[in-house]
Amino acid sequence: MLSIVFILCIIGVWCAPNVLQDGDFEAGNPKTAWTCSCDLTLSPDSHTGSHSVKVDNRKFKYSGPAQVVPVQPGHRYTFSAYVKLLNQLPGHLYHGVNINVDIVTTQGNHHYDNMGKSPYIQLGTGWHLIGGDYLIPNNTKTFKVYIEIDQPQVNYLLDSAIFEEVPPLHNFRSAADDRIETLRKANVTIKLAGTDIDPAGLTVDLEQTYSEFIIASAIDAKMIVDPNYKKYQDFFYKNFEWGLPSNALKWTGTEHVEGHTNYSVPFAAVDALLQHGKKVKGHNIFWDVKKSVPKWQYNKPAAELKSLMATRIQGVVGGLKGKLQHWDVNNNENLHGDFYEQETQRPQHHPCGCSERHIKADPAVKLFLNDYNIVKQPYDIHSSVRDQAAKAGLPIMIHRELDVDTADEQEKAARIYEDLYCLTLQGGTIVY
């Protein structure tokens, strides 16, 4: 199985109306539209407009602004809002904010689910965008959305809340074909030297040697350099423009035992890709999920761990200086783990000044944040943040895994097309 990487352009502007009542908290009394087992009072500290709502005196972790919203079963909706923490509990580097839903089914049962989460919000860092998408189940009778923070003692401000339907994609294939005609095709003028050549008797053959639309694959670093796997190598070099040594560059792969660092296999793989005219993405410098951290790093003193991280950057980034186009850094995964932040007691995603050290080790390489499971059914937990990145013009690289084990070019293209189409159903569109 090969991991395919696509560049996705997200549609960031919905045309549907906001179905929340008093989502901007400018109506005068937030308790008219919102309910809460807490105190809701207006605050002049706002994200937009003149007011936000202050949420305090919370009784339970689920005590937060809640509202029943009108929805249509089988349709997808997106929620977004801005949150600012007013306090932070001792012993916490940050607090997580969840957008949860309470669905009453047509049978009268309650179904509780998560619509979105932002796990690392810090005091003193201003307003934070939270959000997510949700596909409304067909047996929905009523649908309530509410904000939850696990620690009831945490107070916060909420503003600019929006709940709206995600417009369905209609005529996707014909629209994609139209974009292909306008964006991916152009007329070619061929000029013949000499006056004695009859163009009517000529035929022109075009051979595509490189695709402008980037499709990359994770690779097995050993197999890409082992002469016994020539078919594997030929398949990769024929079909992909970029390569990513999937596990070989991770810290567990290069230093499984403390003090025994070995970069020979992944570095050889990078050289092989470059020799074949391919570009390379590095993955990854650090992995922040504890189970994926080398076990010998557990319980290291903070100062020693920061020193080890600095050495790691110099060794792997400096060792490949000038060879890689991209690096996944700080950290994989940003939303699922915080091992290095907790162990160094530095809440930033740069517990050792990683970005600064990384830039010094290879100033030309582009740095990427990397994560997984941000698009999933029935909810898309970070779609609002994703859309904001797209609105700002930032590229988003999408990782998908699919089988492409057929030699038939038409079937292979159809499989990739279907997978891309599934991505568009999450609220985005592919630019061909």
Image (spheres, rainbow, N blue to C red):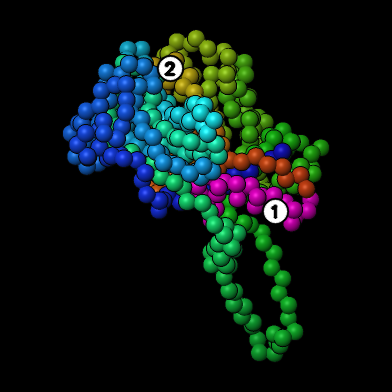
Residue 202 is left or right of residue 109, and the answer is right
**Label 1 sits on residue:** 414
Mark 2: secondary structure: helix
Of the image marks 2 and 1, the number of the one nearer the N terminus:
2
Which quarter of the figure has residue 22? top left
In the picture, the disc for residue 342 is: 2
Kindly report the secondary structure that dominates the magenta region of the rendered protein. helix
- Badge 2: how crowded within 10 Å, few (<14), some, or many (20+)? some
Which quarter of the figure has residue 208? bottom right
Q: Amino acid at mark 1?
A: Ala
176 or 321, nearer to the observer: 176
In the image, the segment drawn in magenta is 407-431
Question: Residue 409 in magenta?
Answer: yes
Of circles 2 and 1, the one toward us is 1
Q: Quadrant of the N terminus?
A: top right
Query: Does residue 111 appear in this view?
Result: no
Q: Amino acid at mark 2?
A: Gln
Residue 238 is left or right of residue 357, and the answer is right
316 or 83, nearer to the observer: 83
Question: Residue 3 in magenta?
Answer: no
Residue 63 is left or right of residue 193, and the answer is left
